[in-house]
Image: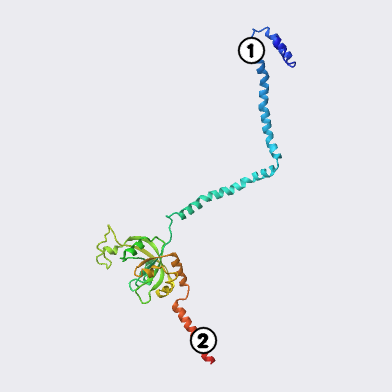
Amino acid sequence: MGRRARATAAGAAECAGTADSSQQQPPASKRQRVKKELKQQTEPAEQAAPAQTDAAAAKKPAAAADTPGAAAQAKAAAKKPGRKKGTAAAAAAAPSTAAATADALTSDAPVQQFFLVKSEPDAFSIDQLEARPKQTEGWDGVRNAQARNNMRSMRVGDLAFFYHSSCKVPGIVGIVKVVREAYPDVTAFDPASQYYDASSSRENPKWWQVDFQLVRKMSRQITLEELKNHKEGSLTGMALFNRPRLSVQLVTQQEWQFVLGLEGQEGPAAAAAAAAAEGGGKRSKGKKSS
């Protein structure tokens, strides 16, 4: 009774009621009664704490809205979905673009090559190629190892200058393209052919050919003499001068573009004729004035 009398004034009546009821119940230990009283006092405080925490959390957005720049941030956040649509569209398109770029940069990507192929016009001329079905012909009869290797490196779509050789005016007369890659030259298997080679068999072919299709004739023939004028300049490394007997030659892209540039210019013969005509006109004019 002495310890219960020292309780707070606010809980005196409750303590007194407890004292009266305790007289009707079996006696309990003092320690159990003290623990029960402490539990009754702490439970309301524990229940109030979560409620206060929830209330504080609910107030935070409002407080954030009062901070400087909050309105601008909220406006920017509202616009983000619109930008995301554009970003998503760009991301969807990116894989195909990246794949195309990757393909273009790989060593396996096709790179156009350029060549020069020779043919004697009395054996097979560009006019005969033009008259062939689909303007296409198999390039058989090559019996030089380097020329054969150059043909075997050709890929569909590669281009070549058609060059008339061993004639009165040798030179480039047209452009052809590869439409079928290297396959065995069957003339090497035929004993009746002038290109027969007993060392070449169908099981182990030694000689190969490709199929060329006419792209176009040159607007004018670019003669060997005209090309030689640039032997010490833009065409200094051209195989036409360094390997003149090779019937299938590699041509660099720079050489290819330079020769095409010559086509649009007046040839030496035309230029000489024009100069002669101009010089003759000047002389006759001088005679008339004298």
Q: Residue furthest front?
A: 232
Nearer the observer, 122 or 18: 18
Q: Which residue is mark 2?
A: 282
Quadrant of the rendered image containing residue 182: bottom left
Q: Position of residue 101 (x, y in %)?
A: 49, 54
Q: Is residue 174 visible?
A: yes
Q: Which residue is mark 1?
A: 31
**Which SS class for mark 2?**
helix
Q: Residue furthest right?
A: 9
Quadrant of the rendered image containing residue 133: bottom left
- Under mark 1, the amino acid is Arg
User: How would you rate the neighbour count of disc 2 (Cα within 10 Å): few for under 14, some for 14-19, many for 20 or more?
Assistant: few
Q: Residue at x 68, y 9 (%)?
A: 22
Q: Residue at x 66, y 30 (%)?
A: 54
- Under mark 2, the amino acid is Lys
Q: Position of residue 214 (x, y in %)?
A: 40, 67
Q: Is residue 130 visible?
A: no
Q: Position of residue 204 (x, y in %)?
A: 28, 58
Q: Position of residue 47 (x, y in %)?
A: 66, 24
89, above or below 128, in the image: above
Nearer the observer, 114 or 179: 114
| 3D distance between C-alphas at marks 1 and 2 | 139 Å
**Which SS class for mark 1?**
helix
